[in-house]
Image (spheres, rainbow, N blue to C red):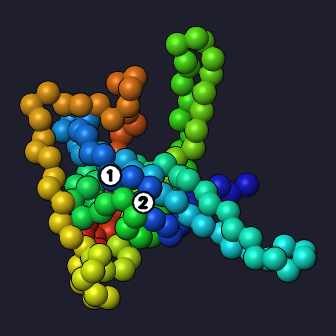
Amino acid sequence: MANYNKVILVGNLTRDPQMSYLPSQTAVTEFGLAVNRRWRDQSGEQREDTMFIDCRVYGKQAETVNQYMAKGRPILVEGRLQLDTWEGKDGSKHSRHRVIVERFQFLGGAPGGGQGAPPQRRQSPAPQQQAQPAYNDDTAPPPPEDSGGEDIPF
């Protein structure tokens, strides 16, 4: 049986991106994404649900997302699902899925900048001498292999 792990989502950032660096000095940016689904129920009433998804992006793309994106901005992400598991301090087991972003595209223009305006720049923190791990347990997965896509999608 063949396996396929691909996710494509369009949504808005739920918080400003948070960038850190792996011990190898690879940039890692994490952000939350809110994705809405609208439908009509059996009575014909319009319904809506919102799903909140954690996302992580590596390398040059991580720096680009951190620099240009902010809470509320729309983005299209393409990537794969990853299951993170850990044990709590009380011994309980926890898990959650996240999207490892392989490609992305900014949507819309800068706030108040019109339809074709590029996203506004945010200051990117400089790499620190002491690397900050992206995981609490100091074990981060290796960054995904370069898929040959462009680093800056505009």
Q: Residue at 62% x, 22% y: name it.
A: 93
Q: Nearer the viewer, residue 24 or 52?
A: 52
Q: Nearer the viewer, residue 111 or 147?
A: 111
- Position in image of residue 146 (x %, y %): 32, 57
Label 1: which secondary element: loop
Q: Residue 26, located in which quarter of the rendered image?
A: top left
Q: Residue furthest top?
A: 90
Q: Residue at 85% x, 80% y: name it.
A: 44
The N terminus appears in which quarter of the rendering? bottom right
In the displayed structure image, the side of residue 49 where residue 7 appears, left or right: left
In the displayed structure image, the side of residue 129 where residue 116 appears, left or right: right
Could you tell me how far apart the alpha carbons at marks 2 and 1 are, in whole angstroms?
8 Å
The circle drawn on residue 54 is none
Label 2: which secondary element: strand
Q: Residue 70, located in which quarter of the rendered image?
A: bottom left
Q: Residue at 48% x, 57% y: name it.
A: 33
Q: Is residue 53 above or below residue 89?
A: below
Dot 2: within a 10 Å radius of its alpha carbon, few (fewer than 14), some, or many (20 or more) residues? many
- Position in image of residue 94 (x %, y %): 60, 27
Q: Residue at 17% x, 66% y: name it.
A: 121
Q: Is residue 87 above or below residue 15?
A: above
In the displayed structure image, the side of residue 93 where residue 80 appears, left or right: left
In the displayed structure image, the side of residue 84 where residue 30 appears, left or right: left
The C terminus appears in which quarter of the rendering? bottom left
Dot 1: within a 10 Å radius of its alpha carbon, few (fewer than 14), some, or many (20 or more) residues? many
Which residue lies under the disc numbered 2?
13
Which residue lies under the disc numbered 1?
17
Are the residues at dot 2 and dot 1 in contact (C-beta closer than 8 Å)?
A: yes
Q: Nearer the viewer, residue 93 or 110?
A: 110
- Could one spot residue 102 in this view of the protein? no
Q: Amino acid at mark 1?
A: Pro
